[in-house]
Image (cartoon, rainbow, N blue to C red):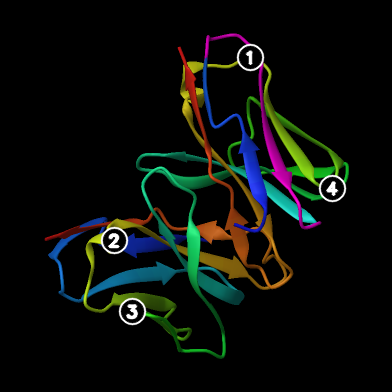
């Protein structure tokens, strides 16, 4: 599992509340990613990071922000959660050869 | 725009049978192609990774093939087991941009006893 953990693993929140998901890795990988996975859409990239304080947007970044103040932690924040953000969120890291390893996922429900 | 198309969308087979999943891509220039297995409720796990010069790679009962000329790949599962029931995802990376891969939507495989 390349030492990737996500927290929380499950969360239920109300519309309009802020939510932060955490991804933690133990192997000093440079690249980290946040994806969401929804039925019929597969995995879609939200944001990614290529180093401390270096982040960029993916294809579905609206409504999400990220921060990476330490190599090992990559945070995903929903500033004001909406029902359309109900999804399963996966964190991933990338090795230099391009191989990606994924975390166990966080199931988020926005009511 | 880079695209990865997988077929079939879903597949049901009997335990012990073989099956083949398909992946077509438009990613160019090509860097590598990966197949992942994703069990329900878990993150994807890598099965194989192939570069331009490789046209086949095996991982136990899983064999992936790559035809870089036609931009097609297949994943063949031999002697299927109940534990093969999962979603199989094809992922293709672009040369020079290999850190932002393109994902297929996956093929859902169900193996019945």
Question: Could you tell me which residue is drawn at 88 percent across and 46 percent down?
Answer: A52
Q: Are marks 3 and 1 on the same chain?
A: no
Q: Are marks 4 and 1 in contact (CB under 8 Å)?
A: no
Point out which mark residue A71 bears.
4
| First to last magenta residue range | A13-28
Q: Please, which chain is the residue tagged with disc 1 on?
A: A
Q: Nearer the viewer, mark 2 or mark 1?
A: 2
Specify whether A83 is left or right of B61. Answer: right
* Residue with the mark numbered 2: B83
Task: Sort mark 4 into few (<14), some (14-19) or many (20+) by Cα contacts within 10 Å.
Answer: many
Which corner quadrant of the image does residue B79 belong to? bottom left
Between disc 3 and disc 2, whose residue precedes? 3
Magenta-drawn stretch contains A59: no
Q: Residue A1 at what x, y percent from top left? A: 59, 57
Q: Are marks 2 and 1 in contact (CB under 8 Å)?
A: no
Q: CA distance from mark 3 to mark 1?
A: 46 Å
* Residue with the mark numbered 1: A80
Point out which mark residue B61 bears.
3
Specify whether A15 is left or right of A98. Answer: left
Which corner quadrant of the image does residue A96 belong to? bottom right
Magenta-drawn stretch contains A20: yes
Q: Are marks 2 and 1 on the same chain?
A: no
Q: Please, which chain is the residue tagged with disc 2 on?
A: B
Q: Nearer the viewer, mark 4 or mark 1?
A: 4
Q: Are marks 4 and 3 in contact (CB under 8 Å)?
A: no
Q: Are marks 3 and 1 in contact (CB under 8 Å)?
A: no
């Amino acid at each position: 599992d390349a030492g990737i953990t996500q927290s929380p693993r499950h969360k239920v929140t109300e519309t309009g509340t802020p939510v932060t998901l955490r991804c933690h890795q133990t192997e000093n990988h440079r690249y980290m990613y946040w994806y969401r996975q929804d039925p019929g859409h597969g995995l879609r990239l939200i944001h990614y990071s290529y180093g401390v304080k270096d982040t960029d947007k993916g294809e579905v970044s609206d409504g999400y922000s990220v921060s990476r103040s330490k190599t090992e932690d990559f945070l995903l924040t929903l500033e004001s959660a909406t029902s359309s953000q109900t999804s399963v969120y996966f964190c991933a890291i990338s090795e230099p050869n391009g191989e990606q390893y994924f975390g166990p996922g966080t199931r988020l429900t926005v009511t | 725009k880079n695209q990865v198309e997988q077929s079939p969308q879903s597949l049901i087979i009997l335990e012990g049978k073989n099956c083949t999943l398909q992946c077509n891509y438009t990613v160019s220039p090509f860097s590598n192609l990966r197949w992942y297995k994703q069990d329900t409720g878990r993150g994807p796990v890598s099965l194989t990774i192939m570069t331009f010069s490789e046209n086949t790679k095996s991982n136990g009962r899983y064999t992936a093939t790559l035809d870089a000329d036609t931009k097609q790949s297949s994943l063949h599962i031999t002697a299927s087991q109940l534990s093969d029931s999962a979603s199989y995802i094809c992922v293709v990376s672009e040369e020079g941009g290999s850190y932002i891969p393109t994902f297929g939507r996956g093929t859902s495989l169900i193996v019945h006893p």
